[in-house]
Image: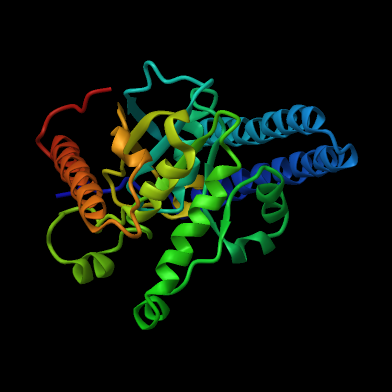
């Protein structure tokens, strides 16, 4: 049973949410404008060393944008963040980051939690999102990988499209082979909802069935450059929040658990698309990880249930 969500008066939420949104918008317009100017510098001089230096400057601008947004949230929102497991993470090596996915708020949470603790966090975006005002061009300048994902119905009619999606994942990851990067993968492939969960069956209580293909292809493309897999579990004890909840005092608590795991060496060498035994092995390993994650979510929610006593901080 989830604890009830304490909801402030509507007038308070409207004022706080509007102010927070205005702060976000101002930060986005200002720093995206700076980002565009720096991106032009990268294309002005066709030398690899110059492009590398400018790319680092672009990342610094991106991190400044996240830092200001995170500061605004901490300034205007009473949200409690219970985060554990960040010890030992490094910025000078590459990681695959795996997380469950419940809300668009997940991105802001992960960016704030890992800011300057991991290399700049990048994640796969649908091709259509490049048209988002300000942010689409900024994501492109920051080398976020854009993917043209095929709908499930199309893949069922033409299974070859699945391989096309996975090969696009491999190509997107190869550009990061020469610099530290943290690549975020929501292995469920979509946000958790009760309706989607019902369609997936009852193997997990709080997760959708994982899709291991993108993770395997990313590991293959990056190779031993990867220092490990950062396994993240996000829990919203009061229920999955909307963006408006997150900026208008409607998000009481966020729980984040982080574990660094080793990546099996075989993940770098196998052929996920063609080798059935290898594919089944990775799928079994990812499902085992998700069973642990599901049990952890159950435990966290039980600790927040009424009468469970004070939660650890």
Instruction: Judge whether 265 appears above or below 148 on screen.
Output: above
Q: Nearer the viewer, residue 161 or 90?
A: 161
Is residue 83 at least partly visible in the picture?
yes
Instruction: Judge whether 43 appears above or below 196 on screen.
Output: above
Q: Position of residue 294 (x, y in %)?
A: 18, 45
Q: What residue appears at the point 17 percent right and 40 percent down from the top-left corner? A: 292
Is residue 8 at least partly visible in the picture?
no
Farthest top residue in view? 88
Q: What residue appears at the point 40 percent right and 53 percent down from the top-left corner? A: 214
Farthest bottom residue in view? 157
Q: Position of residue 125 (x, y in %)?
A: 54, 56
Q: What residue appears at the point 42 percent right and 20 percent down from the top-left corner? A: 89
Residue 43, quarter of the rendered image: top right
Q: What residue appears at the point 39 percent right and 76 percent down from the top-left corner? A: 155
Residue 267, quarter of the rendered image: top left
Q: Nearer the viewer, residue 13 or 73?
A: 73
133 to the left or right of 88:
right
Q: Nearer the viewer, residue 120 or 250?
A: 120
Quadrant placement of the C terminus: top left
Instruction: Judge whether 289 appears above or below 226 on screen.
Output: below
Give the color scheme: rainbow, by chain, secondary structure or one colour: rainbow
Q: Position of residue 29 (x, y in %)?
A: 76, 46
Q: Position of residue 63 (x, y in %)?
A: 63, 31
Farthest left residue in view? 307
Instruction: Count numbered badges in the picture.
Output: 0
């Amino acid at each position: 049973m989830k604890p009830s969500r304490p909801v402030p008066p509507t007038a308070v939420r409207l004022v706080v949410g509007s102010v927070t949104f205005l702060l976000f918008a101002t930060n986005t317009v200002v720093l995206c404008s700076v980002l565009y100017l720096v991106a032009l510098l990268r294309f002005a001089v066709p030398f690899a060393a110059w492009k590398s230096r400018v790319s680092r400057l672009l990342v610094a601008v991106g991190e400044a944008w996240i830092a200001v947004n995170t500061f605004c949230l901490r300034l205007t929102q009473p949200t409690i963040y219970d985060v554990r497991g960040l010890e030992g993470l490094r910025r000078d090596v590459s990681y695959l980051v795996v997380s469950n996915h419940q809300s668009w708020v997940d991105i802001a949470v992960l960016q704030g939690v890992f800011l300057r603790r991991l290399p700049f966090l990048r994640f796969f975006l649908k091709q259509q999102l490049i048209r988002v005002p300000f942010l689409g061009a900024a994501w492109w300048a920051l080398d976020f990988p854009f993917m043209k994902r095929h709908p499930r119905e199309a893949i069922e009619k033409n299974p070859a499209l699945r391989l096309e999606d996975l090969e696009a994942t491999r190509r997107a990851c190869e550009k990061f082979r020469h610099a530290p990067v943290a690549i975020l993968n929501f292995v469920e492939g979509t946000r958790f909802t009760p309706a989607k969960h019902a369609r997936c069956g009852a193997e997990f209580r709080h997760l959708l069935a994982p899709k291991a293909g993108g993770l395997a292809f990313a590991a293959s493309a990056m190779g031993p450059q990867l220092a490990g897999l950062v396994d993240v579990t996000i829990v919203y004890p009061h229920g999955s929040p909307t963006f408006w909840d997150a900026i208008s005092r409607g998000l009481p608590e966020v729980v984040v658990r982080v574990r660094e795991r080793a990546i099996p060496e075989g993940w770098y060498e196998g052929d996920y698309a063609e080798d059935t035994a290898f594919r089944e092995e990775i799928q079994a390993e990812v499902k085992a990880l998700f069973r642990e994650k599901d049990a952890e979510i159950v435990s966290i929610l039980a600790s927040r249930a009424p009468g469970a006593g004070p939660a650890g901080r």
